[in-house]
Image: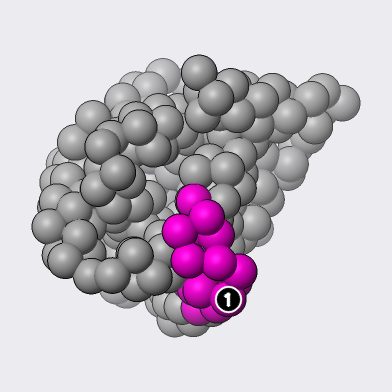
Amino acid sequence: MLAGSALLLGAAIGFGVRVSQKVIATVMAFGAGVLISAVSYELVGEAYEQAGLAPAAIGTVIGAAAYTLGNLWLARRGARHRKRSGHHAAQAQPSEAQQGGSGLALAFGALLDGVPESAVIGVGMLDGGTVSTVTVAAVFISNVPEGLSSSAGMKRAGRGTTYVFGVWGAIAAASTLAAVLGYTVVGAFSPAVIAAVTAVAAGAILAMIADTMIPEAFEDAHLAIGLVTVSGFLVSFALSHV
């Protein structure tokens, strides 16, 4: 719930305040760096330590493939640019008049992006909460720019306050449920299965970063954007080693 609430915080900023594209790109790059580090050290690294290379590698590939297939299906229904702020017309979210059903596709796209992150929070708590604390911090930090950029794009597409905050409120609730299921359901399985599930979520998150976060971050990249991404990576890395 805490990690998911960052989506609402970002949405409030993006919907209520006019934020420059360079600020959005900077914050999104920082969030991408945070998540890349969390995936590397807290998810794939943990899966490897629990069950070895094969479950970690296979799970990561399966997660990335599943996310990509889901994303392709949603992209054809108007959710391709769901994390875009709409600054460029060619990469703006479509309105409902432009593409019927795109609002529902955007909601499903947000769910597709958010559930893997939350599920691994619950799975991380199986080891006493140390991993989940870092993952919660990483997801919270990265969710703020996601909500900010996407809600700005929704506003530009003509979607109202009820829709925007209804979507992010529902995703925050779904994220909470995903974490609970990750803890209660996955916890009943063997360490190898838990490792594989963690790796599947990691693959999905990494594919999401590459497909939706990095393009928005680097669309109007200024010269320091690479440094910002590295800074986010190091913040998450430091959290995992405190």
Where is residue 165, by image quadrant? top left
What residue do we see at 38% from left, 22% from top?
13
Residue 35: percent from the left, percent from the top? Answer: 54, 41
> On screen, 185 above or below 154?
below
User: Residue at left 57%, top 43%?
Assistant: 41
In this rendered view, identify the residue nearer to me: 239 or 66: 239
Residue 75 visible? The answer is: no
Badge 1 local density, few (<14 within 10 Å), some, or many (20+)?
few
Please tell me which residue is depicted at 31% across the width and 25% down the height of the picture: 9
User: In the rendered image, which quarter is residue 54 located in?
Assistant: bottom right
Assign the N terminus to one quadrant of the image.
top left
Mark 1 secondary-structure assignment = helix
The percent coordinates of residue 157 (x first, y second) are 41, 50
Residue 116 forms part of the magenta stretch: no
Up/down of 83 relative to 103, above or below: above
Q: Is the magenta stretch mostly helix, strand or loop?
A: helix
Query: For the point 75% across and 37% down, which residue is it?
Result: 220
Say whether residue 51 is visible: yes
Amino acid residing under circle 1: Ala
Q: Verify whether residue 51 appears in magenta.
A: yes
In the rendered structure, which segment of residues is drawn in magenta?
46-63
From the image, tell me which residue sits under label 1: 54
